[in-house]
Image (cartoon, grey):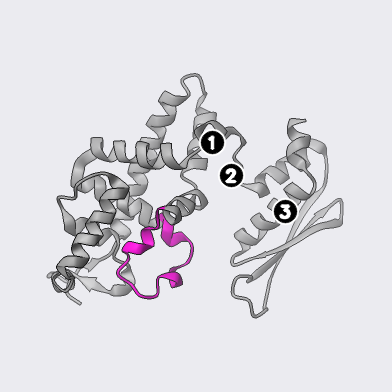
Amino acid sequence: MNFLGHFLKSSSNEDVMFFRRLKKITTLKAYNKNVYRTAFTHRSKNLKDNNGHLINFERLEFLGDSILGIVVSFFLYNKFPFANEGTLTMYRAKIVSRENLNQIGQKIDLVYFLDQKNKMNFGKNIHGNLLEALIGAVFVDRGYQKCCRFVMKKILVEHIEIDQLQHTVLSYKGLLIEWGQKTKKNVNFKTNSDTGLDPEFNYTTQIFLDNKQIVKAGGVSKKKSEEEAAKRAFHTMNINSRIHG
């Protein structure tokens, strides 16, 4: 489908509702409306411009990812004036993690703007992808200063518990392995593909502590399966209190 034809099909009422709801999120007036439409166009629509180039949110997602990293780094630099480079890097990684961006994008309900009927078929990462694409669109439309203000006020302040970053876990698997090394415990992960009927569990992970199984969990990918199992082990063994106790 032609890109221009796609937008001409949108009714004026739909257009008004689209940008009225979008402004509630960004608090900014949209000047370049097409860039926001692009930010919520999935590649499965197979839209092309007059030169045959594909039109979807992926380029804006790439741009938004870069802008987000810069704004978050600047924010943390000012918020924690005495934190060293390692701490700032860790905090930034927690804020821009895929899981965290997915949660924010889902809370804001960005899939509402997708011009697609089967919105649930894109997986959980669609929420974070759209958030980054929106950031990219704001940057293109309103420039760095407006985009920076949007990210800080509407994303960081409203959706990130900055003072709790120290206690936020980025990777339960990494934390569990680190705990095992410090306490001289033998922690092993055993992950196998799961041929069951549930599409949410393509892999199953068992965690052994000194050759004794302590938890078992599943996930759609090997990484998610291991992370879920590690999270269960973390809470089952009350490792947090042992670390800080």
Q: Which residue is painted at 63% across and 71% down in the image?
A: 202
Amino acid, disc 3: Arg
Residue 16 point in image, percent of width and height: 19, 60
Q: Specify which label sits upstream in the sequence, 3 or 1.
A: 1
Q: Residues within 10 Å of mark 2 (few under 14, many from 20)?
A: some
Q: Specify which label sits upstream in the sequence, 2 or 1.
A: 1
- Cβ–Cβ below 8 Å for labels 2 and 3? no
Amino acid, disc 1: Met
Q: Which residue sits furthest bottom?
A: 197
- In the rendered image, which quarter contains the N terminus? bottom left
Q: Is residue 82 left or right of residue 55?
A: right
Q: Is residue 119 magenta?
A: yes
Q: Is residue 157 visible?
A: yes
Q: Is residue 127 left or right of residue 209?
A: left
The stretch of residues the image draws in magenta is 108-128
Residue 165 versus residue 61: which sits nearer the camera?
165
Residue 114 drawn above or below residue 89: below
Residue 168 point in image, percent of width and height: 59, 40
Q: Which residue position is annotated with label 1? A: 90
Amino acid, disc 2: Leu
- Cβ–Cβ below 8 Å for labels 3 and 1? no
Q: Which residue position is annotated with label 3? A: 232
Q: Which residue position is annotated with label 2? A: 170
Q: Splitting the image into 4 quarters, where does residue 153 fall?
A: top left
Q: Main secondary structure of the magenta part?
A: helix
Q: Measure the C-alpha gap from mark 2 to mark 1.
A: 9 Å
